[in-house]
Each structure stands twice: as C-alpha cells, then as structure tokens.
C-alpha cells in the first residue's frame, strides 16, 4: 500500500471523486464530437450573418446576436470545463492532455470567427451606443456591453486580433500546461512523494521533518530549474509583448482593467498592506518564543504551536464541520454547499498525476461548478474545503444571472471564499475550551490571514520586480528571479524569519504567476473586504445575510464599486483598507 493510498483510506476520501458525467460521459466521444462540430458551425454562421453589420443593428437584432454569442460561449465553456477537469486529475495522461489541447484550439478557432463583434461594437460612438443601451430589451446585457467598451483603447485591427487568437493555443496556455505536466511528473525525496505531500510536511510539529521537507522541495525544484526559469521568462516576455502592442502602460494594467478597478485603487491597497508589514514581524517574533526556537527559519513559518490539535480530521467530519458552520449563517448557503458533497461535485483524494493545490471551477449556468482539493486531514485542509465551497456557492448563485453576467471580477470572486473560511473558523473557535488551544487556533488563523493579505501582496511585489526586470534587462537568470523573490519576502519578514538560500528557488512552483499574471492582489483585496463585511454582519445580524447573498448572486453584473455600495464601502478610501488592517492588529495584540 502506497503512502497516498493509506492517507486516502484513513481519511475516507478514496471515493470522493467528481462526477464528470454531468458534463459528458467519459469514454463516449460522440456527444463531445457533435458539440464541437456544432460550435464550429455556429461560429462560422454568426460571422456569415453579422460581419460588418453590427453598427447598423436595431436593439432587437443586437439582443438576438448577443444571445447567440452567449449560447455559443456556453457550449465552448462546457467543452473546455470537461477537458480541463478530465486533464487536471491525470496530467501525465497523454490522451487527456491531447483532448484538452484540442478543445483549446477549437475555442481559439471559434473566437477568431466571432472577434468581429467586440471590435465593431466598440467602434460605435458613445452617443449612439448609449442610445441603443437604453432599450429595455438589452437590459440584461447592458453592463456586459458597456464594460466591453473599456477595452477600446487596447484593441487591435481585426487581422491582428485573429492572428493572436490563431496562435493562442500554442502560446501562454501551452506553456502553463507544460508547467502542470512538469509538476505532474515530478517526485520529491527518496520515496518519490508528490508536491502536495511535501508541502503538507511544512506544517508538521517536528522541526526536522519540516527541514527535510524544505530540502526535498528545493531539490525537486532545482532539478527542473532550467525548464521552470525558461517558462517564467517566456511568459514574462509574452506579457511584455502583449502589453506593448495593446498599449498598456504597466504590466498590471490589463489585470486592473479586467477587475474593473482604477489603478489608484490597487495602488492604495498595495501601499496600505506593505505599510503594515510590521504586523507580520511582530507576530513571528512572538511565534519564535512560543515554539522555543532560537531562530525561526522559512520552513518553520507554518509550524503548529504545541497546543494546536493535531488529530487528523476525516472527510465526514470535515463535511459536518463546514455544513454546520454554513447553516448557522444561512440555510440557503448550506443547502447549496451540501449538493457538492451529495451529488459528487468534489475531487478530494491525493492521487498520482493530480495537480496540487485547490480550486473551484465554474462551468455554465445549466451545469454546476466543481471543486478540487488535495485533502490530507489537517485543520488547514478543512479551511481550504470551506474556501473552495465558498467559491462554489458564489458560482451557483451567480449562474442565475446568465453566462456573461455570472463572470465575477477576481477581486470579488475571492470574497465568498474568504468569508466562508471565517464562518468555519469562528464556529470551530467557539467549541474550544482550553485557552492554550484557543490561542494556538487563533495563531493558525492569523497565519492564514497573513498568507492571504501580506504574503500575496509580497508576491505581487515579486511579480512587479520580475515583469519590470524582464522589460528593462532582458531574459532573467534563475539567480535574478531568486533575488527578486528573497528581496520582496525579506521586506515582509524583516529579521523575524531567517530566509535560507534554498528558499530563493520557491518562486518557481507558484502557478498563479503564470496562469493569471497580477492575480494575487485579489486575495488581499478579498480578505480585507471580508474583514469589513464580517464586522458589518456582527453589527447588523440577520439583516446582513440577505444583502450578502444578493452580492454573491449579482455575479459580475456591475462594477465592484457599485456592488459594495449597499454596505457603505468606499474602495478608493485608504481608510477602508486600514480598517481591515486594524482588525488584524487587534488579533496580533491578543497573541502578544
């Protein structure tokens, strides 16, 4: 019996496998083939009927066109979701990889046929577009069509847009797939453990086990250093070229535009968080004393305090804990989350070839989302399940707005997940009677908050250094990337944590830098927003619950600024961000 098999059997996750048949029946390619053919035909038909006619369409005709495009994108979304989920649990399976690539190429081909719509719609002058959007028939697509126009300064002539779509399957996505394949095949240490198993050991209570895990992770990363460095450089250069030809002034500009945020809002967030790095340093100095260590190394950061319960939590107990916490807040929220468990929408065991980490993947309005975790039975894993189910609940609620309007900006997409974590934390905290255990549990939550706010912001600073360095200095060596990583991490930790030279390679296993450049500040945004929302919940009680569910159900049907207005929140105010940071200072003060 392998170590992973033993873990899965002990925790009762062996059979917690998602039911992809809700999308397509595995092994039966006939429906897949039919849907692929139909999508290709419909994309060509839309182009044939509407090319160079968008500027003269009546509101009724425009509605029919957008509705057809949405249905086409739904079909493609369903195909892409199946191919991705099928691949992500078996990244070393050539057949699954080939299907994933084939669907990506189909999406690219259909996009090439229909890209004319966005280009033609955006060329309509503001006055004419405003008059068209006043028509009641377009009410459901009003925000979608208005927000599309923000990309006008960055769009290219049609021939160039089509060329970029044509080459997309062998561009960024192909490189991120290579990254996933590298880690899917990579084994760590003499026993050939998975990335997830090694990372889990960094939370072990034994210093030597943590040290060994860090050494094994570093050794594994160094064995692929030449490939990973090349992938990071290639994708940094890809973004540099894309930003240049699309006329973005900074590397983060496209992400901010996608999140429908002003650059100044994001700058205010980053400035506020980096100005309070002292909170991280204060906490880790206390933790060093609580652990009785003369020096706290990077691999000691997540060491549990001696009083923290270390019993492994099996899957049924995890399910009960999460659903009871959700029920205490909202029965509707608990009912939706319950479907993920009972209807097999979750993939939980640690298995060979499965990608590490966790995610919740939205599908299309008529098919539910799916959740992937690598469950190893820790308190942290219970929090991760709550986090991803928060996403899942959000995606189910937002789907009622339709495919286009359910696409939530990343910064608000993190709100539901972090709020769900907080609900589970507070319900668990109430059950703890021992003061020592309670303190240890609060410490673990603080570390989770630090990871979400301060570490993600420090990673944003690494990205800033990497992208600007690639633009100013050309291709970057692994040593240069390591120095960017260590410098931005040391700014956060100060002298409270000793960062080893080995830690300088750990930038290379973080997929967000490649999949979605600039994404990581969304975590800090979401956590600080949640701290503010939770404070409002404590003040308003039950009256808050429906307002909160309405926020989730709104999806991406308006800008973040408008969606949070009912809560009296001003995202452009530095005082708002410091309000959340003050809550963290109170928690640090309790530990001190």
Image: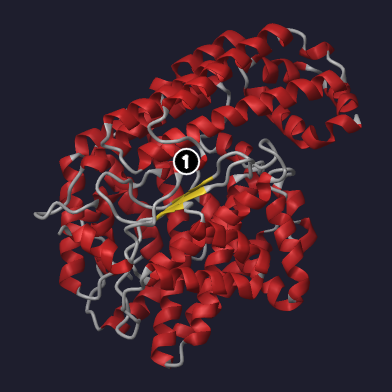
Q: Residue furthest bottom?
A: 434
**Image spot of residue 403 (x, y percent):** 66, 37
Could you tell me which secondary element the residue under label 1 belongs to?
A: helix
Q: Residue at x 44, y 16 (%)?
A: 167
User: Which residue is under mark 1?
Assistant: 21
Point out residue 1 in the picture as x, y percentages from the top left corner: 15, 59
Name the outermost residue toward the left. 190
The answer to whether residue 526 is seen in the rendering is no
Relative side of 437 to 577, left or right: left
Within the image, what quadrant is residue 508 found in? top left
Q: Is residue 289 left or right of residue 54?
A: left
Drawn side of residue 68 relative to residue 100, left or right: right
Q: Foreground: 569 or 402? A: 402
Residue 443 horizontal/vertical position (percent): 42, 77
Which residue is pictured at 57% across the width and 8% down the height?
A: 159
User: From what the image shows, is residue 403 above or below residue 374?
Assistant: above
Please identify the quarter of the rendering in which residue 262 is found.
top right
Observer able to see residue 43: yes
């Amino acid at each position: 019996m392998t170590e992973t098999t033993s873990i899965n059997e002990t925790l009762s996750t062996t059979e917690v496998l998602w039911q992809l048949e809700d999308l397509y029946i595995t092994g039966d390619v006939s429906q897949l083939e039919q849907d692929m053919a139909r999508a290709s035909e419909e994309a060509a038909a839309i182009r044939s009927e509407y090319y160079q006619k968008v500027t003269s369409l009546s509101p009724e005709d425009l509605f029919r066109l957008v509705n057809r495009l949405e249905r086409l994108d739904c079909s493609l979304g369903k195909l892409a979701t199946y191919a991705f989920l099928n691949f992500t649990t078996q990244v070393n399976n050539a057949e699954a990889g080939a299907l994933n690539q084939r669907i990506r190429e189909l999406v690219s081909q259909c996009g090439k046929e229909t890209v004319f719509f966005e280009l033609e719609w955006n060329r309509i002058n503001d006055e004419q577009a405003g008059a068209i959007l006043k028509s009641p028939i377009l009410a459901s697509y009003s925000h979608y069509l208005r927000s599309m126009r923000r990309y006008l300064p960055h769009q290219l002539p049609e021939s160039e847009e089509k060329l970029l779509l044509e080459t997309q399957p062998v561009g960024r996505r192909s490189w991120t797939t290579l990254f996933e394949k590298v880690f899917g095949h990579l084994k760590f240490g003499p026993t050939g453990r998975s990335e997830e198993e090694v990372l889990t050991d960094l939370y072990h209570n034994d210093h030597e086990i943590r040290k060994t895990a860090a050494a094994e992770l570093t050794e594994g990363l160094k064995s692929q250093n030449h490939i990973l460095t090349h992938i990071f450089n290639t994708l940094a250069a890809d973004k540099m070229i894309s930003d240049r030809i699309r006329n973005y002034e900074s590397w983060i500009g496209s992400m901010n535009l996608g999140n429908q945020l002003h650059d100044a809002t994001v700058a205010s967030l980053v400035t506020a968080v980096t100005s309070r790095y002292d909170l991280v340093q204060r906490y880790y100095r206390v933790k060093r004393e609580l652990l009785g260590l003369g020096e706290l190394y990077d691999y000691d950061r997540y060491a549990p305090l001696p009083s923290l319960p270390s019993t492994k939590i099996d899957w049924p107990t995890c399910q009960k804990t999460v659903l009871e916490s959700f029920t205490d807040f909202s029965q509707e929220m608990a009912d939706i989350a319950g479907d993920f468990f009972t209807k097999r929408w979750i993939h939980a065991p640690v298995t060979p070839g499965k990608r590490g980490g966790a995610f919740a993947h939205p599908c299309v309005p008529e098919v539910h989302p799916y959740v992937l975790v690598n469950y190893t039975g820790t308190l942290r894993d219970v929090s991760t399940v709550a986090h991803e189910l928060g996403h899942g609940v959000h995606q189910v609620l937002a789907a009622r707005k339709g495919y286009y309007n359910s696409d939530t900006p990343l910064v608000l997409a993190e709100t539901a997940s972090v709020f769900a974590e907080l609900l589970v934390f507070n319900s668990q905290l109430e059950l703890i009677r021992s003061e020592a255990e309670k303190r240890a549990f609060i410490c673990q939550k603080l570390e989770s908050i630090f990871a979400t706010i301060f570490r993600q912001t420090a990673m944003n600073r690494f990205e800033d250094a990497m992208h600007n360095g690639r633009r100013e200095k050309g291709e970057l060596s692994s040593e240069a990337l390591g120095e960017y990583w260590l410098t931005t991490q040391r700014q956060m930790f100060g002298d409270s944590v000793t960062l080893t030279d080995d830690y300088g390679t750990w930038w290379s296993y973080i997929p967000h830098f490649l999949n979605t450049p600039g994404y990581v500040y969304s975590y800090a945004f979401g956590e600080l927003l949640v701290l503010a929302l939770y404070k409002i919940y404590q003040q308003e009680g039950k009256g808050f619950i429906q307002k909160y569910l309405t926020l989730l159900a709104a999806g991406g049907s308006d800008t973040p600024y408008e969606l949070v207005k009912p809560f009296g929140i001003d995202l452009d105010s530095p005082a708002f961000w410091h309000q959340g940071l003050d809550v963290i200072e109170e928690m640090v003060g309790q530990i001190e």
